[in-house]
Image: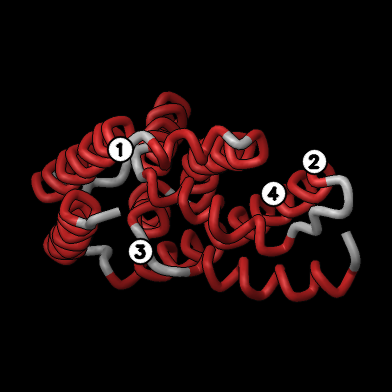
Amino acid sequence: MDLVTLLWFIPACFALNMTPGPNNLLAMNNSRSYGFGAALYGGAGRIIAFAIMIALTASGLAVILYASQTLFMLIKVAGALYLFWLAFQLWRSEAIPLQEGDTTRTYFGLAKQEFLLAAGNPKAILIFTAFLPQFVDIQKNTDQQFFALGATFLMLELLTISIYALFGLYLRNWFARPQMAKAFNRVCAVFLSISGANLLFSRQ
């Protein structure tokens, strides 16, 4: 892959990564509730899900998923229902941060949440299917190019997780009072519900 293509890819990719969405919202809320490190551990689940999707795109299996309307719809409904479930949990949350000794057991749960949230959104596969190939030169080794683009995407996604987590830490100071924290959780719950509805009723 030539340097010029990569220089075009990086800003476009970073803008895509920074777009507010359920996963970024979850990373921000995890950081506010449990700390910066916990949000990064949780973000690892998202990175794994996206890595699998990029591998599917590179192998051409994403096209099969897109062609199968039944499978696509099943994933979409499951993803929307999971978003609604997360929104319900956030709405009922008492917004009390975990104690320091409890975070080890929580890291896996946060990573699983991020993984399921990313994997349950078939639009992510469509993004990879439509976005990454634009920067691939079919006259050259496509596997190497997909690997380079995918690795760059994942590094930028990790940077995005860090930025949203830092923003969550900033919010932590603003929402130190339980009443304010609960209000923030409910705002996040509303946005997750809207995302779920958008996913469920979108045509693609």
- Distance between the Cα atoms at labels 1 and 4? 26 Å
In contact (CB < 8 Å): disc 1 and disc 2: no
**Left or right relative to 137: residue 199:** left
**Left or right relative to 79: residue 16:** right
- Distance between the Cα atoms at labels 3 and 1? 42 Å
In contact (CB < 8 Å): disc 4 and disc 2: no
Question: In this figure, which residue is indicated by the disc labeled 4?
Answer: 150
Q: Check disc 2 and report its element: helix, strand or loop.
A: helix
In contact (CB < 8 Å): disc 3 and disc 1: no
Question: In this figure, which residue is indicated by the disc labeled 3?
Answer: 172
Q: State the residue at coordinates (48%, 34%).
A: 64
Badge 1 or badge 4: first in the primary sequence:
1
Q: State the residue at coordinates (55%, 52%).
A: 128
Amino acid on which the number 1 mark rests in the picture: Gln
Question: Is residue 53 something one can see in this rendering?
Answer: yes
Numbered-mark total: 4
Q: Residues within 10 Å of mark 2 (few under 14, many from 20)?
A: some
Amino acid on which the number 2 mark rests in the picture: Asp
Q: Residues within 10 Å of mark 1 (few under 14, many from 20)?
A: few
Determine which of the numbered discs, if any, sits on residue 69 in the image. Answer: 1
Amino acid on which the number 3 mark rests in the picture: Arg
Q: State the residue at coordinates (44%, 63%).
A: 169
Q: Nearer the viewer, mark 4 or mark 2?
A: 2
Q: Quadrant of residue 119?
A: top left
9 up-or-down from 126: above or below = below
Q: Check disc 3 and report its element: helix, strand or loop.
A: helix
